[in-house]
Amino acid sequence: MRTIKELRAKLHPKNSFENKYNIEPDDKIHLLYVSPKMNATG
């Protein structure tokens, strides 16, 4: 498991997008499901 200091250094603003996030090609389908509520309680 990574330490907080390692993760914080990785997310530093001076790092490029590729260094911040591990973007690797994979054979998964990534799906974002959003269900907004259109009333006062949601």
Image (cartoon, helix red, strand yellow):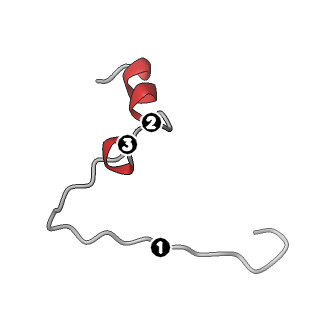
Foreground mark, 1 or 3, reads 3
Chain-order first, disc 2 or disc 3: 2
Chain-order first, disc 1 or disc 3: 3
Q: Disc 3 marks which residue?
A: 20
Percent position (x, y) of residue 41? 81, 68
> Is disc 1 in contact with disc 3, using a CB cutoff of under 8 Å?
no
**Residue 16 location, quadrant:** top left
Numbered disc 1: secondary structure: loop
Percent position (x, y) of residue 36? 65, 75
- Dot 2: few (<14), some (14–19), or many (≥20) neighbours within 10 Å? some
Q: Which amino acid type is marked by label 1? A: Tyr
The quarter of the picture where the N terminus appears is top left
Q: Disc 1 marks which residue?
A: 33
Which mark identifies residue 11? 2
Foreground mark, 2 or 1, reads 2
Seen from the viewer's position, the closer of residues 19 and 33 is 19
Label 2, label 1: how many angstroms apart (C-alpha)? 26 Å
Residue at 31% in and 69% down: 30
Label 1, label 3: how many angstroms apart (C-alpha)? 24 Å
**Residue 4 location, quadrant:** top left
Residue at 32% in and 42% down: 19
Numbered disc 2: secondary structure: loop
- Dot 3: few (<14), some (14–19), or many (≥20) neighbours within 10 Å? some
Percent position (x, y) of residue 42? 75, 69
Q: Which amino acid type is marked by label 3? A: Lys
Label 2, label 3: how many angstroms apart (C-alpha)? 5 Å
> Is disc 2 in contact with disc 3, using a CB cutoff of under 8 Å?
yes
